[in-house]
Image (cartoon, rainbow, N blue to C red):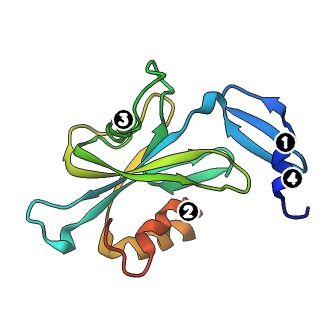
Amino acid sequence: MSAPTHDDMTLPEEVRWEGRFIIAKQRGRWEYVSRSRGIGAAVILAIDEGADANPHDRHVILVEQFRVPLGRPCIELPAGLVGDGAEADEAPALAAARELEEETGYQAARMEDLGQYHSSPGMVSESFTLFRAHGLTRVGDGGGTAGEGITVHRVPLDGLQPWLAERRAEGYAIDVKLLLLLGEGFSAV
């Protein structure tokens, strides 16, 4: 397929298939997927600073969840849909706080909005808002809601790269958003 042009944007958007959560669409020659009802996501970068602020005692909170499209478990930052529950007009920061506690058992004293991002813009119109969770307190076990089967991992930042390499060698998928933590000069945002 040749590269899209601005001319593609002048053509009408056509719905090819619609499910409960996603919609397959086409505009000109371009096929892509959107979330139903315009729902976005909140992704949480949660770093536990430790009690004494020792830079070697910093841990990132990650989740492991089986992902059907991949056919295997995936290591990810905690995340969830905004406004998918009873609160259709839920603020992204509230969704981030809710999802962090649901999935990981941690509460944050403060959520810092780091902006909106697009995960795979050549194929998916979905966006997510990235939040940095500050002042973490463990209040429960996490694990998500019934049926999610989430496992929580508290991984030392100093050892993240080898830890992820071990998971990859064991057959786990690794979410692209973890590159945020692996870049040269990483400063934990």
Q: Position of residue 150 (x, y in %)?
A: 45, 42
Q: Amino acid at mark 1?
A: Gln
Quadrant location of residue 3? bottom right
Cα distance in 3D space between marks 3 and 4: 44 Å
Q: Which residue is mark 2?
A: 176
Q: Which residue is mark 1?
A: 26
Camera-near label (3 vs 4) is 4
Camera-near label (4 vs 2) is 4
Q: Which residue is mark 4?
A: 7
Badge number at residue 114: none
Q: Amino acid at mark 3?
A: Glu
Q: Position of residue 92 (x, y in %)?
A: 41, 37
State which quarter of the image contains the C terminus.
Answer: bottom left
The answer to whether residue 149 of the structure is visible from this angle is: no
Quadrant location of residue 35? top right
**SS category of the residue bearing label 3:** helix
Camera-near label (1 vs 2) is 1
